[in-house]
Amino acid sequence: QVRTTESGGGSVQAGGSLRLSCQVSADIATNNCIGWFRQAPGKEREKVAAVYTYIGSRYYADSVKERFTISHDITTSTIYLDMNALKAEDTGKYYCAAKAVSQVGRCVIAWSRLEFPYWGQGTQVTVSS
């Protein structure tokens, strides 16, 4: 069983920054598709960013492009989400999820459909305007 543990959430003012971390209990060279997602109160969970660690391909939702950056450290099985220029609409619980895929296209599809077998408990991000 693969576990993901998110941390780094908190409360910030609009325009501020936060760095979220996701610790994966297994090798992320094998569980090579990692996605960040978020869910605001009363709304459905949505995709935020993803990385296919095998070749380092990164993907972002339009709403966070140019503001958020996903990165990873293979040696520590940690995935980061650097969030800058935060807006009130970025408020929500942020989740990290992992799965093993055979090619980058399958990672993109899984991320788009939120089809991941391993999910963390989430970390809360609150942005005040």
Image (spheres, rainbow, N blue to C red):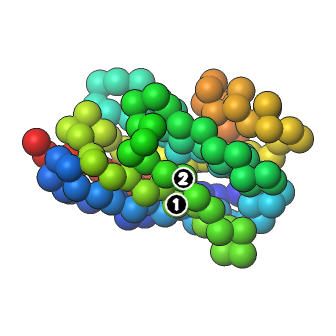
Density class for disc 2 (Cα within 10 Å; few <14, some 14-19, many ≥20) is: many
Above or below — where is 79 with respect to 105?
below
Res. 8 mark: none
Instruction: Give the x, y percent position of residue 85.
Output: 28, 48
Residue farthest to the left, as pictured: 129
Contact (CB < 8 A) between labels 2 and 1? yes
Residue 56 in sight: yes
Q: In this view, does 57 lie to the left or right of 19?
A: right
User: Judging from the image, what secondary structure is the residue with disc 2 in?
Assistant: strand
**Disc 2 residue type (three-letter):** Ile
Q: Can residue 118 be seen in this view?
A: no
Circle 1 sits in a helix, a strand or a loop, which is it?
strand
User: How many angstroms separate mark 2 from mark 1 (CA)?
Assistant: 6 Å
Instruction: Give the amino acid type for the residue marked by disc 1 in the picture.
Output: Tyr
**Residue wearing tag 2:** 70
Q: How many marks?
A: 2
Q: Is residue 15 left or right of residue 112?
A: left
Mark closest to the chain's N terminus, 2 or 1: 2
Question: Which quadrant, please, contains the N terminus?
Answer: bottom right
User: Based on the displayed image, in which of its 4 quarters is residue 91 positioned?
Assistant: top left
Image location of residue 94, percent across then percent down: 42, 46
Compared to residue 57, the image places residue 39 above or below, namely: above
The residue that disc 1 covers is 80
Query: Looking at the image, which residue sits at the far right?
Result: 102
Farthest bottom residue?
75
Estimate the x, y position of residue 129 in percent, counting from the top left: 10, 42
Q: Which residue is located at x 86 percent, y 38 percent?
A: 103
Image spot of residue 86 (x, y percent)? 27, 46
Residue for point 20% across, 38% down: 88
- Residue at x 17% of width, y 47% of height: 14
Classify mark 1: residues with Cα within 10 Å, few (<14), some (14-19) or many (20+).
many
Q: From the viewer's perspective, is 45 left or right of 26?
A: left
